Structures are given as structure tokens and as C-alpha cells.
């Protein structure tokens, strides 16, 4: 957006001269005169000083397209001060210091206007960069009309109105700006719909206020410590707070009344943001930051012939979390007879082998019995005895020196695992709850911080007490939380059992690197965690589609249907790959001629391409809306998950398919490998591959699900393969 200039003019209010003009050895005294001399083009360089009515300026100063006004960008305009106010032509009631039209640019100055607005932008694609706006009686900046500017690296402080106000049809981008001590940090009205990225709004009355009918995009913003509300939405505003393939990554925390207030009648979905459920108001759905597919099960894309194939060792995982669990450690079946078949058996056995847990006199362990706070303190003190103390002793009035767990409670408290109540009691005989135990281990181990948005995977997250939100987010990220039988139910306030405590304690050892990860029982999410689709009932792919829906990997159309027998686009398939496998990049990004940055799946397409699942075409197009063939689906999954290289490929397994001669030669090895891995599901005729037929949404759902089964991330299903 930066302008190319052919003329450079200098301005210095302390030594410049406006009349007579044209002196080559002297700068102009006023910016007003320099703007006239520039005649709509060129660079105007401002020397440090104050530019005001007292120095001869006439306000408002108008920057037209082609003019760049430059102060001190490195200091964000410190020392280069423009202060004053004047009526804006054609805008009744507006008084401003500067007016920018067309593509005018302002860089590295400080703007002050106690009587009105610091800067008004009337249309165009101008740029305001590295500037400060202070002591403005109205807004710091007001963007209006159809302007679509770039506002970058600005600091707006103490505006009586809004720090940045965008109205009418304004768009553009607001990036890396700091807005503090304003009535409203950012304000959007009308149909304004800019991209807001990396901004910080703190210490304002309200951080960001959205009204009207706009649909701005918010990414990586921090709306924190505002006096009233972090983000306030009203009228028919429809902000984009994250998409399945493009998480919002906004932080809305520690605001005085609410972090997010939705006063609209619309349901707001926030994907991948740091939010606490207890600080939200209105119709808001939080989605986990695991990049689910934004438009139902996508369709795969062909990796072109000649692409180098890569493979992982058997059982390895080429994706981000959740990792494939290592070989399970067998639990001695005779040690505790009541653990046979119990889901916590391996964890209890592993702790028993370290002499950290013991059974009862009758030889049982009683995994479903509760545990008291005293027993819990004893266990964490023993399990993590190598950790140093981090705080001084505390005397609990209900824990006598001769109490059997006195020493353990003291050690656990000093190491930061436990604390008492405000009345100086510890209440050692009370049952330990699930939230207390999990939070205690996460806090005591001092595990890395994690966004609270990770708690969105739990249906009952609203039951998490405020004090435990951060600790539970940390515990979830570190793998301490394993919920049985329903992974989506945290049950925070329930008493924790002896078996469940063993799981949390052992997972803490894993997080410290002091124990190997154990395999856990594969648990199916409860039916209809997120509802279902009316048109998949009794469909041959129903179970796989439902499981992907429960895992938040697919969504249906706006009418609530999935349309399992429709073909899928390559863009949709890229989105599913990005959400299901989160591939790490293996090659540089590539710009596709038919995928602009504004395309809904642009990020997902790059993720799938860089992960070597998908490729484009020789003309550098991606064919985002094209259908995917069944053979392309298998090739993409096998290549992207590295399930070819180093593996013996038996092409003989293709003999059972009557139409094997239709498999392209470049794809034969991949299809054979897909068949060996049970990714190939042919319905209704198992002997017909139909490799060059468009893959349906059901075909792709099943193939992706089977790949997740292969990775140990989903339980095997009995697929109704037909006759």
C-alpha cells in the first residue's frame, strides 16, 4: 500500500519559511504550505516540533491520494506533534485535525485534538502507520464511507469517544494497534467489516463495541482489563471469531463485568479463543481450537503423479495431538482382583509398581471408592517427592501435629499442590472433587500455561469454578484429564475416585517425563454430543459421520442436513484434512491463482498443500470447487500420512477388485496401501473400487475416520458395507 513518490518536501516549524516559496536551502514552516506545494503527490518529511495554529497551520490538514506525510516512525511519532481542529468539509458536525482522502498516507506523527477527532478518513485505501493519537475530544480516528485503509501499529490513548471508529461501509485492516483509556477502544457501526488482527484494547470502558450489520473478522486480538465489557455485540452485527480452519486466537479475559456480551438475536460461534464461560452473556457457543471443518466433510485432492512418497514407521503419527499412544504397559492381573477389566487398571498397576499406591487388607483396590483430602495430600507428596518447596509452612487449625497425614499435608502444601480454606482449615476428611484434584496436580507441577478456550471441548464446562479455569485448561493441554466413559463430560464437582486419582497422578509423571505414556481404553463420545443430521439415519456411513460430528470435525449445511451422497469440493477436503490431522509443513507455501487470501478455505488449502496431502495443477491453480475422485481421496490420505515410504506394498491385494485396471498407474501403490489399512470401503459392492468416480461426502467421511482409527484416535467401527 506504500506510495511511490517522486518529490520530497521538508517541513520544520522552528526554522522553516513558507514565503517566498521554492527556496531549495530552507524547509517549509508549515505542513499546510507543503501540502499545497505537493499538488497531490510526493513525500513530505516533518522535523520534530509542534505543528499548530500558533505555528501557522490551518486545520483540518487534508492528505490527498499520492501524498505521504512522514515524521518519526521509529519512535511512533514521539516529538512530531500535530495539534489543532477545524470543520471537515461536507461532514456536518465533524471537526478534525487531519483528513485523509484516497490513498494518502500518514506515518510517524502524534495527533492531538481536544475539540474533536484526530483523523477522519473519507474513502480510499490510505495507510496510517506508527502514529500516536492523544487527548482527542471525540474519536482518535474515524473511518467512513467506503474507505478500506490499513491502520497499523497505532497507539490511541485517552480518547473521550472511541479510539478507532469505523462506520458506513468501511473495511480494510486494523493491525497491531494499542487502544487504552478510551470510552470505547474500537467501535464498528453500519456495515463496517474490517479485519482486526493483533490489536490490544485495555483500560477502556469497553474494549470493542460492534453495532449495526457488519461482519468484521477478529484474529489474535487482546481485549483485557477493560472496566465494563471486553467485546459487546448488538443489533445484527455478525463478527467472525474464528473458523474451523482458521481459529480466532483472540484473548478476552479479566474485564470488569463481562468478557463477551452478545445482545443480538443471532447465535455467535467462537472458535479457538481464550474465553471463560462464566464471563459470557447471550447466545454464544464456544468451539475448541482444533480447526474443525467449516462446511461439512470435504473432498480430497489428488497429489499429482511423480510426487515423492514419504512414510512413517508403522504405528507412528504424522499429525499433531492427540498423539498415538505407545504400547500399553500390562497391569498385573492378580495384584488387585477388582481391577480386572477396569479402565484405570494400567495406571493403578504402574503406581503400585512404584510403591505409590496400595490396596486394602482383603487384597482389593476399590477403584470406584472416593478419596479424602488427606489421602490425596499423601499421594501427591509421595509421587512428586523430588519437587522443591516453593512456599513457607501453613498451620491448619484442624490438622494436629499427631494427625497421621500431618507431614504429607505439610509437604504437599509447601510444594504448591494444596491449600486450605479462608478459615485456616484444611478439612482433611472431606472428599476430594475432580476439579480440586486435577487443578492441584496442574498447579503443583507448574505446567506451561494454556488458553482457557481448550475447555470448550467439555459440554459441562460451565460447571468449572472460576478459580480453577486456568488450572484445568493447563491440565487438559498437558494430558492430565482423561474422562471416562464420556470424554466430553468433565464432571468437575463430583468426588474423584481412587482409580481416577491414579490416572491424574500418573499423567502428571508423564508430563514431567518421569513415566512412559500408557495406552488408554478407546472411549466413544456419547451419542449426539452435538446432535445429528436427519439425512444420515440408517445411512451406511452413519456411524463414521456421527463420530466425526461428535469430534467437531464436520458440520452440515445451513438446513441441518449433511447430504452424504453429494460430491465434495477440493476446498472442503482441504479443510477436513487441516482439522482432522493438523499436518506439519513439509514444503513452502504456494500461491494458487484461483485461491485469493479472502477465500474461506485459503488457510486450510495451504495447510493441506504444505503438509503434502494435496497439490495443485500445472497452471498453478488449485481447482478449489472441483470434485474429488475416489482414487484421489486414497492417494491424498496415504501420501499425507506417510504410509508408503519404507512399507512393503503388495499389489496383489488389488486382484480382488474387478475394476482394478481403471486405477491410474501412479496411484496403484497408494490404493494398495489404503486397502491394506482398511481405508477402502466400497458400498454396496466391495469388489468395485470405482476409482475415477467422484467421492461422496460419505466416502470421504469413512476414509478419514478409518485413517483416525489407524492412528489410534478413534475406535474401530463396523461399517455396513452392503451386499
Image: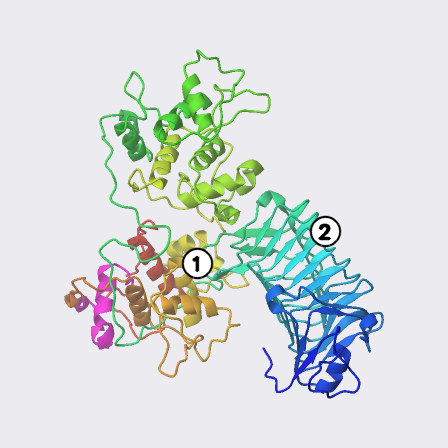
Q: Pointer 2: what residue?
A: 205
Instruction: Give 645 or 366, whichever is nearer the viewer.
Output: 645
Q: Is residue 683 in view from this perspective?
A: no
Against 697, residue 15 (above or below) is below
At 42% from the left edge and 25% from the top edge, which residue is drawn?
376
- Residue 442, compared with residue 100, is above or below; it is above
Q: Is residue 441 left or right of residue 664?
A: right
Magenta-colored segment: predominant secondary structure: helix
Q: Residue at x 15, y 65 (%)?
A: 650
Q: Vertically, is 35 above or below 255? A: below
Q: Quadrant of residue 256?
A: top right
Q: Which residues are magenta?
A: 654-681
Marker disc for residue 305: none
**Crowding at mark 2 (Cα within 10 Å: few <14, some 14-19, many 20+):** many
Q: Which mark is residue 536?
A: 1
- Would residue 636 be visible to someone looking at this image? yes
In the figure, 330 relative to 599: above or below?
above
| Image spot of residue 579 (x, y percent) | 42, 59
Q: Could you give the CA–CA distance between mark 1 and mark 2, rounded to whole angstroms?
A: 48 Å
Please identify, in this view, whether the residue under mark 1 or under mark 2 is nearer the observer: 2
Give the percent coordinates (x, y) of residue 54: 83, 70
Amino acid at each position: 500500500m506504500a506510495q511511490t513518490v517522486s518529490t520530497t518536501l521538508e517541513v520544520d516549524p522552528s526554522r522553516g519559511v513558507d514565503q517566498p516559496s521554492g527556496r531549495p536551502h530552507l524547509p517549509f514552516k508549515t505542513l499546510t504550505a507543503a501540502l499545497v506545494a505537493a499538488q497531490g503527490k510526493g513525500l513530505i518529511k516533518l522535523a520534530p516540533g509542534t505543528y499548530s495554529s500558533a505555528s501557522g497551520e490551518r486545520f483540518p490538514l487534508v492528505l490527498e491520494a499520492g501524498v505521504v506525510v512522514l515524521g518519526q516512525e521509529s519512535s511512533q511519532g514521539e516529538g512530531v506533534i500535530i495539534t489543532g481542529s477545524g470543520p471537515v468539509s461536507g461532514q456536518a458536525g465533524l471537526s478534525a485535525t487531519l483528513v485523509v482522502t484516497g490513498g494518502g498516507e500518514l506515518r510517524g506523527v502524534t495527533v492531538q485534538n481536544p475539540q474533536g477527532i484526530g483523523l477522519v478518513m473519507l474513502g480510499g485505501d490510505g495507510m496510517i502507520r506508527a502514529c500516536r493519537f492523544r487527548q482527542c475530544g471525540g474519536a482518535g480516528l474515524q473511518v467512513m464511507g467506503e474507505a478500506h485503509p490499513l491502520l497499523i501499529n497505532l497507539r490511541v490513548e485517552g480518547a473521550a469517544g472511541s479510539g478507532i471508529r469505523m462506520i458506513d461501509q468501511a473495511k480494510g485492516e486494523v493491525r497491531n494497534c494499542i487502544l487504552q483509556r478510551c470510552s470505547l477502544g474500537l467501535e464498528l457501526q453500519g456495515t463496517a467489516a474490517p479485519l482486526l488482527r493483533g490489536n490490544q484494547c485495555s483500560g477502556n470502558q469497553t474494549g470493542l463495541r460492534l453495532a449495526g450489520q457488519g461482519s468484521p473478522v477478529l484474529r489474535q486480538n487482546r481485549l483485557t482489563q477493560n472496566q465494563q465489557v471486553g467485546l459487546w455485540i448488538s443489533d445484527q452485527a455478525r463478527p467472525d471469531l474464528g473458523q474451523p480452519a482458521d481459529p480466532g486466537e483472540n484473548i478476552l479475559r479479566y474485564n470488569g463485568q463481562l468478557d463477551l456480551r452478545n445482545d443480538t438475536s443471532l447465535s455467535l460461534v467462537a472458535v479457538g479463543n481464550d474465553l471463560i464461560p462464566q464471563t459470557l452473556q447471550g447466545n454464544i457457543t464456544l468451539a475448541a481450537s482444533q480447526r474443525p471443518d467449516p462446511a461439512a466433510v470435504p473432498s480430497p485432492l489428488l497429489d499429482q503423479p511423480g510426487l515423492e512418497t514419504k512414510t512413517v514407521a508403522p504405528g507412528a503419527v504424522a499429525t499433531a495431538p492427540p498423539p498415538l499412544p505407545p504400547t500399553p504397559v500390562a497391569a498385573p492381573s492378580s495384584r488387585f482382583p477388582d481391577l480386572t477389566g477396569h479402565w484405570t487398571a494400567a495406571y493403578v498397576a504402574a503406581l503400585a509398581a512404584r510403591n505409590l499406591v496400595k490396596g486394602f487388607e482383603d487384597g482389593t483396590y476399590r477403584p470406584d471408592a472416593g478419596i479424602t483430602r488427606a489421602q490425596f495430600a499423601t499421594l501427591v507428596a509421595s509421587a512428586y517427592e523430588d519437587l522443591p518447596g516453593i512456599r513457607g509452612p501453613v498451620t491448619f487449625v484442624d490438622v494436629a501435629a499427631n494427625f497421621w497425614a500431618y507431614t504429607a499435608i505439610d509437604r504437599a502444601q509447601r510444594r504448591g499442590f494444596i491449600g486450605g480454606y479462608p478459615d485456616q482449615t484444611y478439612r482433611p476428611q472431606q472428599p476430594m472433587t475432580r476439579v480440586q484434584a486435577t487443578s492441584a496436580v496442574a498447579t503443583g507441577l507448574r505446567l506451561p500455561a494454556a488458553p482457557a478456550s481448550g475447555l470448550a471441548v467439555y459440554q459441562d464446562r460451565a460447571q468449572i469454578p472460576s478459580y480453577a479455569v486456568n488450572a484445568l485448561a493447563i491440565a487438559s493441554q498437558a494430558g492430565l484429564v482423561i474422562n471416562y466413559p464420556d470424554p466430553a463430560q468433565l464432571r468437575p464437582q463430583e468426588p474423584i475416585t481412587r482409580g481416577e486419582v491414579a490416572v491424574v497422578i500418573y499423567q502428571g509423571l508423564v508430563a514431567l517425563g518421569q513415566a512412559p505414556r500408557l495406552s488408554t481404553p478407546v472411549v466413544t463420545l456419547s451419542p449426539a454430543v452435538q446432535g445429528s443430521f436427519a439425512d444420515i439415519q440408517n445411512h451406511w456411513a452413519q456411524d463414521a459421520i456421527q463420530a466425526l460430528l461428535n469430534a467437531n470435525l464436520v458440520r452440515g449445511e445451513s438446513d441441518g442436513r449433511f447430504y452424504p451422497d453429494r460430491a465434495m469440493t477440493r476446498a472442503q477436503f482441504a479443510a477436513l484434512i487441516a482439522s482432522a490431522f493438523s499436518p506439519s509443513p513439509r514444503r513452502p507455501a504456494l500461491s494458487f491463482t484461483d485461491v485469493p487470501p479472502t477465500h474461506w478455505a485459503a488457510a486450510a488449502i495451504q495447510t493441506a498443500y504444505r503438509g503434502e496431502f494435496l497439490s495443485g495443477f500445472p497452471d498453478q491453480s488449485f481447482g478449489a470447487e472441483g470434485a474429488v475422485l475416489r482414487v484421489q481421496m486414497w492417494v491424498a490420505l496415504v501420501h499425507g500420512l506417510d504410509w508408503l515410504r519404507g512399507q512393503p506394498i503388495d499389489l496383489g491385494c488389488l486382484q480382488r477388485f474387478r475394476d482394478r485396471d481403471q486405477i491410474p498407474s501412479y496411484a496403484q501403490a497408494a490404493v494398495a496401501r489404503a486397502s491394506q489399512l482398511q481405508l477402502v470401503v466400497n458400498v454396496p459392492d466391495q469388489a468395485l473400487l470405482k476409482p475415477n468416480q467422484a467421492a461422496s461426502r460419505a466416502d470421504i467421511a469413512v476414509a478419514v475416520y478409518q485413517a483416525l482409527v489407524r492412528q489410534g484416535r478413534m475406535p474401530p467401527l463396523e461399517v455396513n458395507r452392503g451386499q
